[in-house]
Image: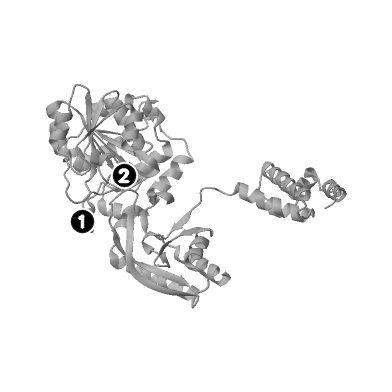
């Protein structure tokens, strides 16, 4: 493009104010804030100017500019956190938000969120209250602990407890329990941040009670046991039971803490899953402090729960870090509603989605799979090879390492596109559908699919495969 042509093209670009007036009358911009529209128009005009100067063919038509600006504006106002359909079979999928909240929790969140509440008010006396009291008694009732406090997540719970009990002192922990979980959370790093001094004992695969006893010195402040909820060591191994460590702690006058990670209030072995120590089991050993997550096997909101001896919990409550790590009223509302369901185990299993998905009988999984297979088969016809297959689901979320849950999945081998392209298009659809690929087939696991999502999955598959 000649310099004169460039000059004329730039000169005849419409002004932002004129385009803004046109956008106000354009239904495509309804509901989009003026500031967002203005920014989108300016960016669109700037792109056109750059194209003109670079001799790239472009349009200066008003409607074309408005269309481009509308796409930018809608992208700007589009929510970043959106619901997805989890068809992976991983129940506690960290990338997908872990636990789904039960209806009781959702209803209570709405009730508390849209109204003032007694978050820090004692209604009986009219004096200032403590927010943790909303769940303290309930947690103690369910676990048998003397006292409890809740913070924003389990990493925060561990950091707060360590900082309170053993700041500037040695914390004795087995080498085999110096774990790393998601997000590069490492026990040694949390110890450093809490102001404690790490004292490793034993070896990666074998640690004995005498290793803890031999490590005791004048600077020892705590025995720490970390439950290996997200990995498993097999073979020639040895570890120390919490109850034995507690007895040693009493003999040496050293407090004992256990980080359970994925704490549970029910015995999963009754439902065909491996035996996982319950929170109440740990409390009965007499350990001073036990920490665990609220959003893993508990099936509640993200939270770090600390239970244990009242004198130790009282010290934790006075720690200035407690305020920095405290939870808000919505988390409290969700946690209280979730915990109340545990007063009746059958009700908890039925109403808490995480528990329901983990314990659903195989025959019920097969029923869900058969219904889903029929819906998908009717929607796709001969566009893909569709079968049912006995595969495995996973608990996920750093719980039950290496456990496979028997499931019956739908496998799809499209005829007109690759399996990887199908996975990508399902993921990029609205709503996003997250499946998995095995043996060059697209896998849909009904374990984590919620009621009503079957038709969404089948219709999305049909749109993608018909469109190619």
Q: Is residue 236 above or below residue 359?
A: above
Q: What is the C-alpha distance between the residues marked 2 and 1?
A: 20 Å
Q: Is residue 202 above or below residue 73?
A: above
Image position of 301 (left or right of 138): right
Q: Position of residue 344 (x, y in %)?
A: 26, 50
Q: Position of residue 191 (x, y in %)?
A: 32, 31
- Please report contact status of discs 2 and 1: CB closer than 8 Å, yes or no: no
Determine if residue 299 is in view: yes
First reached walking from the N terminus: tag 2 or tag 1: 1
In front here: 251 or 327?
Answer: 251
Q: Secondary structure at mark 2?
A: helix
Determine if residue 129 is in view: no
Q: Position of residue 298 (x, y in %)?
A: 31, 47
Q: Residue at x 79, y 55 (%)?
A: 61
Total label count? 2
- Mark toward the viewer: 2 or 1: 1
Q: Residue at x 42, y 37 (%)?
A: 329
Q: Secondary structure at mark 1?
A: helix
Q: Quadrant of the C terminus?
A: bottom right
Q: Residue at x 25, y 40 (%)?
A: 177
Name the residue that disc number 1 marks.
270
Q: Position of residue 201 (x, y in %)?
A: 20, 34
In front here: 77 or 224?
Answer: 224
Q: Residue furthest top?
A: 218
Q: Which mark is residue 339?
A: 2
Q: Residues within 10 Å of mark 2 (few under 14, many from 20)?
A: many
Image position of 171 (left or right of 62): left
């Amino acid at each position: 493009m000649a310099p004169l042509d460039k000059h004329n093209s730039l000169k005849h670009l419409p002004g932002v104010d004129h385009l803004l007036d046109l956008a106000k009358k354009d239904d495509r911009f309804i509901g989009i804030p003026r500031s967002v529209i203005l920014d989108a128009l300016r960016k669109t005009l700037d792109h056109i100017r750059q194209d003109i100067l670079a001799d790239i063919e472009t349009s200066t038509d008003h409607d074309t500019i408005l269309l481009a600006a509308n796409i930018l504006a809608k992208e700007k106002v589009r929510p970043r956190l959106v619901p997805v359909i989890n068809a992976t079979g991983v129940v506690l999928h960290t990338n997908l938000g872990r636990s789904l909240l039960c209806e009781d929790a959702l209803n209570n969140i709405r009730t508390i969120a849209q109204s003032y509440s007694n978050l820090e008010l004692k209604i009986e006396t009219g004096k200032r209250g403590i927010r943790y009291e909303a769940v303290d008694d309930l947690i103690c009732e369910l676990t048998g602990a003397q006292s409890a406090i809740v913070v924003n997540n389990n990493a925060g719970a561990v950091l707060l407890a360590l900082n309170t009990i053993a700041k500037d002192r040695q914390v004795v922990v087995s080498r085999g329990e110096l774990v790393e979980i998601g997000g590069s959370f490492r026990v040694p790093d949390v110890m450093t941040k809490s102001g404690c001094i790490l004292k490793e004992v034993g070896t990666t695969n074998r640690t004995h009670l005498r290793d803890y006893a031999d490590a005791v010195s004048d600077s020892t402040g705590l025995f720490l046991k970390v439950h290996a909820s997200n990995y498993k060591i097999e073979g020639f191994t040895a570890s120390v039971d919490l109850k034995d460590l507690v007895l040693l702690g009493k003999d040496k006058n050293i407090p004992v803490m256990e980080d359970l990670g994925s704490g549970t209030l029910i015995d999963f072995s009754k439902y065909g899953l491996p035996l996982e120590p319950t929170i109440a089991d740990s409390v009965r050993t007499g350990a001073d402090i036990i920490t665990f997550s609220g959003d893993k096997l508990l099936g509640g909101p993200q939270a770090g729960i600390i239970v244990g001896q009242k004198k130790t919990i009282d010290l934790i409550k006075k720690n200035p870090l407690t305020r920095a790590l405290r939870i808000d009223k919505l988390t409290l509302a969700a946690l209280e509603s979730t915990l109340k369901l545990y007063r009746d185990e059958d009700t908890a299993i039925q109403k808490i989605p995480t528990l329901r998905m983990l314990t659903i009988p195989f025959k019920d999984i097969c029923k869900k799979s058969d219904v889903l297979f029929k819906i998908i088969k009717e929607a796709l016809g001969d566009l893909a090879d569709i079968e049912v297959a006995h595969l495995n689901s996973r608990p996920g979320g750093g719980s039950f390492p290496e456990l496979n849950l028997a499931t019956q999945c739908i496998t799809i081998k499209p005829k007109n596109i690759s399996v990887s392209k199908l996975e990508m298009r399902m993921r990029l659809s609205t709503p996003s559908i997250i499946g998995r690929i095995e043996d060059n087939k697209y896998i849909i696991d009904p374990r984590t699919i919620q009621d009503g999502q079957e038709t969404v999955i089948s219709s999305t598959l049909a749109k993608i495969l018909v469109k190619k």
